[in-house]
Image (cartoon, rainbow, N blue to C red):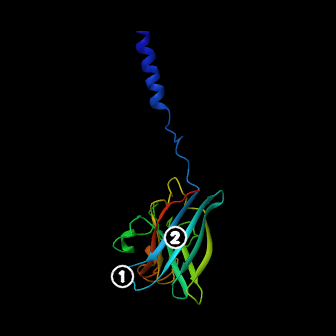
Amino acid sequence: MLKALLFSLLLTLASSTPCRRTNTPTPQKATSYLQPDPSASTKINGTVDITQTKTGLHLKLYIQGLSPGEHGFHVHAFGSIFPNCTAAGDHFNPDNTTHGAPTDSVRHAGDLGNIVANEFGVVDTEIVDSVIALDGRYNIIGRSFVVHANRDDLGRGNAPTSKTNGNSGARVACGVIGIAKS
């Protein structure tokens, strides 16, 4: 009888103890190689190097082959870019909110605003975002970055797609986000 009571007590304690990940460290670095969308006749390519910091996710972008000017840049829901960048799905939006600017309190998690290509079509910039991460609810590992043909209106335009994708146009380049060797 005492053994049965002790066993049921241990079983109750074990089932009420929350599970913890003890052997799976949070990745500190990730990367994405951007390639042109096959349906867009461009030669865009680039890299996004990602580091998790205490102040947010730090993105270092180097992209070439874009038309000069602003281009929408987002994290999309899926890590699939075959047969083209459309396979990446919509913007990463775990909270089911409307599109906005990176600084807006209401925005898709994947809304990273605009990147600016210089007169040679090169983007060499850094972004720090406090919403997306390399673990947890806003984890971007296994999702995709997408570069759009046009400027993102940050959800402030009058176009029908303004509140869903910033009216940023076609997808001209994309890349799957993966864990990088630290």
Q: Work out whether mark 2 precedes mark 1 in sequence or the reverse, and give the earlier one.
A: 1
Quadrant in the picture for residue 174: bottom left
Residue 118 place in picture, x, y as percent: 60, 86
- Mark 1 lies on a secondary structure that is loop
Of 72 and 29, nearer the camera is 29
Residue 84 place in picture, x, y as percent: 36, 74
Q: Is residue 13 visible?
A: yes
Give the CA distance from mark 2 to mark 1.
Answer: 23 Å
Quadrant in the picture for residue 167: bottom left
- Mark 2 lies on a secondary structure that is strand
Task: Name the residue beneath numbered marker 1.
Answer: 39
Task: Name the residue beneath numbered marker 2.
Answer: 111
Residue 94 place in picture, x, y as percent: 45, 60
Residue 22 place in picture, x, y as percent: 54, 40
The correct choice, above or below, for 97 with respect to 117 in the image is: above
Bin the neighbour count of mark 2 within 10 Å (Cα to Cα): few under 14, some 14-19, many 20 and up: many
